[in-house]
Image (cartoon, helix red, strand yellow):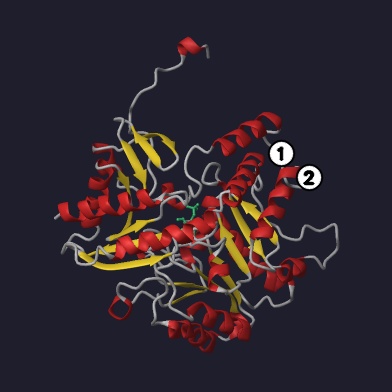
Amino acid sequence: MPASAAPAPTNNLDAFWMPFTPNRQYKAAPRMLVSAKDMHYRAADGHEVLDGAAGLWCVNAGHGREKIVEAVRAQVAELDFAPNFNMGHPKAFEFASRLTALAPKGLDRVFFTNSGSESVDTALKIALAYHRARGDAGRTRLIGRERGYHGVGFGGLSVGGMVANRKAFGLGLNGVDHLRHTHDPARNGFSRGLPEHGAELADDLERLVALHDASTIAAVIVEPVAGSTGVLPPPKGYLERLRAICDRHGILLIFDEVITGFGRLGAAFASELFGVTPDIITTAKAVTNGVVPMGAVFASSKIYDAFMSGPEHVIELFHGYTYSGHPMACAAGLATLDIYQEEGLFERAAVMGERLADGLHALKGLPHVIDVRTVGLVGAVELEPIEGAPTRRAYAAFTKAFDDGLLLRTTGDTIALSPPLIISEAQVDELVGKLADVLKAID
Ligand code: PMP
């Protein structure tokens, strides 16, 4: 079609069926982001918005990083696409090596995906296939946790524990159980870092073992810190206890680090920070600073090796995506890791996290605030729901904050803060100050 015949661009909002959005409400009063640099978005009306959410928990190195832009530009010009089935391209191998150098010891194999949801479903499939490869095919049961979020694939949806996500779709996978969640504001309200109480909740796994027998259980998946369900740090000792029970019964432990991976908590991975090493880690989001969609699943050599004992001409794992290890994603990821390391951003997150925690905990006592939780450079301020209208109050905070120049993320009636790790001290204070003003202004 000649350019002159191309349809004129319109501002019609009808065609795009927006994800996880009340479409009609949004389209009646749209908020449009048109550009971004460092810590800020610019909205269509020209006002600047401080990014308190790292986009969607992913832009850890801040926006518009030249090094990443250049790496992607150069890669797409050099090699735009190359399959990784039965052939490969150098950047995928290079990136996998760089990633494993960063990962907790022993997790030295990487499987590439395109998103957190794909990483989770990949991890669950690896767990099931691992047991089969070892002749333990009875281990088919998967265990998640209430208030877990593991993406939207059928596997992740099934092990996830967000009621609203599940109930629209009827049945998920069979053979799935859930541990109880660890959120306990009565005992752990306003906790800073890891809450004191609740390690014993890990013993739910022993109960499921007693009920079903360990020989039927393949894997347990949890977020070390649940993010999308309201920022729920694990009680002290909880993850250690889960690890011990898994070891006792030959159950694989999967940590979903789609949010906590790549510095969010002040260490490369939550596993490193908490000193508990799972068998598989799922990641996505900040692996490329959110610039190119990508996920990466880390597996131990024990798992990888279990697949490598058959005949050499046989594909060991019948799984993969057209875009597993896409050249542009690998190029973006390599540049991203350079930035994280050159600028010491994980260490910086630990320092800025303390300041954020100081600021957020000082909001106790403001109207509607019923809990504050902080860990690393993540914080949550939970608001008392309006009776009969859950989520309304947090949504009001979100829209007012946006108008006032602050991007928040809300889940239920909890406001979650997870700014890019490049945030300055003054910007942490600005973020907290703006949030305080919003809380004082809403009903
Ligand atoms: N797991 C966790 C812990 C997540 O937080 C998310 C996304 N918020 C996902 C999985 C799904 O990732 P994606 O949206 O990239 O599919």
**Dot 1 amino acid type:** Ala
> Is residue 163 shown left or right of residue 110?
left
Q: Is residue 392 visible?
A: no
**Dot 2 amino acid type:** Met
Name the residue that disc number 1 marks.
Answer: 82
Q: Is residue 223 above or below residue 89?
A: below
Q: Which of the 4 image quarters holds residue 183?
A: bottom left
Q: Which of the 4 image quarters holds residue 111?
A: bottom right
Label 1 SS: loop
CA gap, disc 2 to disc 1?
A: 8 Å
Farthest residue toward the front? Answer: 426
Pick the front one: 290 or 87: 290
> Is residue 394 shown left or right of residue 299?
left
Name the residue that disc number 2 marks.
Answer: 87
Label 2 SS: loop
Pick the front one: 49 or 44: 49
Residue in view at x 59 percent, y 38 percent: 67
Q: Quadrant of the C terminus?
A: bottom left
Farthest residue toward the bottom? Answer: 210
Q: Is residue 152 above or below residue 254?
A: above
Residue in view at x 49 percent, y 69 percent: 224
> Is residue 391 shown left or right of residue 267?
left
Look at the numbered discs 2 and 1 and tell me whether their residues touch, using CB distance below 8 Å. yes
Residue in view at x 48 percent, y 86 percent: 203
Q: Which of the 4 image quarters holds residue 391?
A: bottom left
Count neighbours of disc 2 (C-alpha within 10 A) and say few if under 14, some if 14 to 19, many if 20 or more. Answer: few
Residue in view at x 62 percent, y 43 percent: 335
Q: Which mark is residue 373?
A: none
Count neighbours of disc 1 (C-alpha within 10 A) and say few if under 14, some if 14 to 19, many if 20 or more. Answer: some
